[in-house]
Amino acid sequence: MTTYTLPESGLTSLSAAELAEKIHSREVSSREVTQAHLDRIAETDGEINAFLHVGAEAALQAADDVDKRLDAGEAPASPLTGVPLALKDVIVTTDAPTTGASKILEGWMSPYDATVTRKLREAGIPILGKTNLDELAMGSSTENSAFGPTRNPYDLERTPGGSGGGSAAALAAGQAPLAIGTDTGGSIRQPAALTNTVGVKPTYGTVSRYGLIAAASSLEQAGPTARTVLDAALLHEVIAGHDLFDATTVDRPIAGVVAAAREGASGDLRGLKVGVVKQFDRDGWQPGVMSSYHASLDQLTGQGAEVIEVDCPHFDDALAAYYLIMPCEVSSNLARLDGMRYGLRVGDDGTHSADEVMALTRAAGFGDEVKRRIILGTYALSVGYFDAYYLQAQRVRTLIAQDFARAFEKVDVLVTPTTPSTAFKLGEKVADPVEMYNFDLCTLPLNLAGLCGMSVPAGFAEDSGMPVGLQIMAPAFADDRLYRVGAAFEAGRS
Ligand code: GLN
């Protein structure tokens, strides 16, 4: 079995916090660190396929700029200044193509930077390149990418998860110490679980979606991914905050996640109430995942937490509700990809009407899963079906939010396994969309309720030998709780 996991020594083996310290003390330059990661990408990405675009020149230029400023005695612009990062290719950048892993955007260059991109640049974080994903963030394995799947660095025959498999694989392989993902139904947390990395979906409204190619606007949020909880916290504080360009962002101070991660590192969880979601503690899920999960619960108890079972009956309906609401929003959002304004245009030869050009472009530019969702969503929103499907799904969404609210009256955080099994083999689920959807069972309820969640590494399953993640969920705007508990859990494992 071939693996391409983290190197044991050298710059690409270090955490972002460690790299930042070395760069800020001038022990190494940002250029050296950036170059080391570019070399690692060159060495490994032929097989992993985590990157759709590597922007070596732009990354080194940004690194040189940081080095010049630090050499001149300027204070670092952020705690992560000089540390390079990989960006999911669904977030727009002016100096690199953004494809969303779709043929329909091939060759398109954004005329503006996303707010997240701008914040990264202002923080002095060189962007190594754009990472692979399922087409327009729809999928759970990166197999829906128009540019080939990403492979899991722990076993190249397996998926790194999806949709953000590229970012997760890049972290696991030591190609990048930090990465940005987006999470509509689990696309940050699920790949994190499958690759032994940390992934956080921040509270809805705390990270700007301006310049994030919209699939399902009411569900998705960009978030930090890294190999340690502290690194994720440092990145979280760089990207979060109110944005005048995104009316869904909230004008309130963001939770102090870095302080929480540092506090959690003591490992002390006395006084914390952890709710175990009854619905997601099932016989029939992969035994190796479940035994690791129960060991994680014992560990939390050992660290002083009180573990209580909680009932969230409507979580069982999250899958059905999500796969109605999500496609409905997709069918509307993706109408803009019509061959007129962005990227691909097919049939523009003077013999076709504008309507025909749109139809030909969409037929050629979108893959099967994207088409499936546009059709499903359009159907569920049509007259006669709207009440039965869309409206009903929205009612279920409210019930799920109420389940969370009731649970958080009793406990501080909720936990579940992040996924029902470890990374599956490439090709194993592609023929059956519903089986693919089922893989996201545990991560979907959170997005429907707009709350925050983290997947933190929980070891390796004894049966498959592949990584397992523990999902931690907290109320809206209590992102700091995730980091406190996540860091304590991480400390308790080592
Ligand atoms: N796998 C889920 C879907 O296909 C979630 C994707 C995501 O979070 N972007 O919709």
Image (cartoon, rainbow, N blue to C red):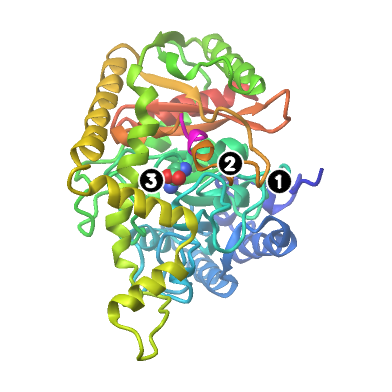
Q: Using the numbered discs, state the Cα–Cα distance from disc 1 to disc 3 in whole angstroms.
A: 25 Å
Up the image or down, 62 lies above or below 277; here it is: below
Q: Is residue 279 magenta?
A: no
Task: From this view, report whether residue 84 is shown above or below residue 221.
Answer: below
Decide if residue 373 is on the left or right side of residue 423.
left
For label 2, the residue is: 227
In which quadrant of the rendered view does residue 421 lie? Answer: top right
Can see residue 141? yes
Residue lying at 63% horizontally and 60% vertically, measured from the top left:
33
Crowding at mark 2 (Cα within 10 Å: few <14, some 14-19, many 20+): many
Residue 341 is at least partly visible in this image: no
Q: Position of residue 5 (x, y in %)?
A: 72, 45
On-image quarter of the C terminus = top right
**Please, what is the dominant secondary structure of the magenta stretch?**
loop
Asked where in the image residue 236 lies, by quadrant, the reply is: top left
Question: Looking at this view, is 129 or 290 the one in front?
Answer: 290
The residue type indicated by label 2 comes to Arg
User: What span is colored magenta in the figure?
Assistant: 437-441
Foreground label between 1 and 3: 1
Instruction: State how far apart marks 3 and 2 are (Cα).
Output: 16 Å
Q: Which residue is mark 1?
A: 6
Q: Pointers 1 and 3 in contact (CB under 8 A)?
A: no
